[in-house]
Amino acid sequence: MPTLGKILKGCDRLAEDAMSIEHHISRNLELPIVSCERGFGALIIRPGVTFPGNIRNPVPLIQIPYSRIVSKYDLFSVAHEAGHDWYIRLGLNYIIPNAFKTAYYFCRATPMITVTNKQINKRLE
């Protein structure tokens, strides 16, 4: 097996570990697939995202730039992208912004802080 294939197989295992947490949502979880991609940053395409041709993505697809795959110290990107998937699966994309919104209300935060927080939460998704 070529070196890149072995590394990607190891990345699949890292992604599987990152997606396997003790939670009822993870019981029927699809195993993620890690692929090599050009570019600067890693990304995840979550299950259920519609591809061209109205085809729904069945599994989490994590794409890692080649430059990060060959450097063993940058493989944390795999777990980081899995975290984005869990952020949505656990509903944190609703819980966290509402917690901040409540805190800002009680602290009488300025409108600028409120707008900045909306931009940050959008980036987390």
Image: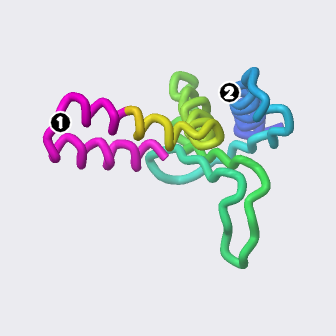
Range drawn in magenta: 100-125
**Where is residue 3 shown, x and y percent of the image?**
73, 35
Residue 28 in the image: above or below residue 49: above
**Where is residue 125 shown, x and y percent of the image?**
49, 47
**Res. 16 visible in picture:** yes
**Where is residue 14 shown, x and y percent of the image?**
70, 27
Question: Residue at the location (32% across, 47% down)?
Answer: 118
Question: Residue at the location (47% across, 52% down)?
Answer: 39
Question: Residue at the location (65% across, 41% down)?
Answer: 89
Could you say which disc has been placed on residue 109 in the image?
1
User: Which kind of residue does numbered mark 2 sit on?
Assistant: Ala
SS category of the residue bearing label 1: loop
Could you say which disc has been placed on residue 101 in the image?
none
Horizontal side, residue 112 vs residue 53: left or right = left
Residue 37 in the image: above or below residue 90: below
Horizontal side, residue 119 vs residue 11: left or right = left
Between residue 58 and residue 76, name the one nearer to us. Answer: 58
* Quarter that holds the N terminus: top right
Could you say which disc has been placed on residue 18 in the image?
2
Specify whether residue 46 is painted magenta.
no
Counting residues from the start of the chain, the first of labels 1 and 2 encountered is: 2
User: Which kind of residue does numbered mark 1 sit on?
Assistant: Ala
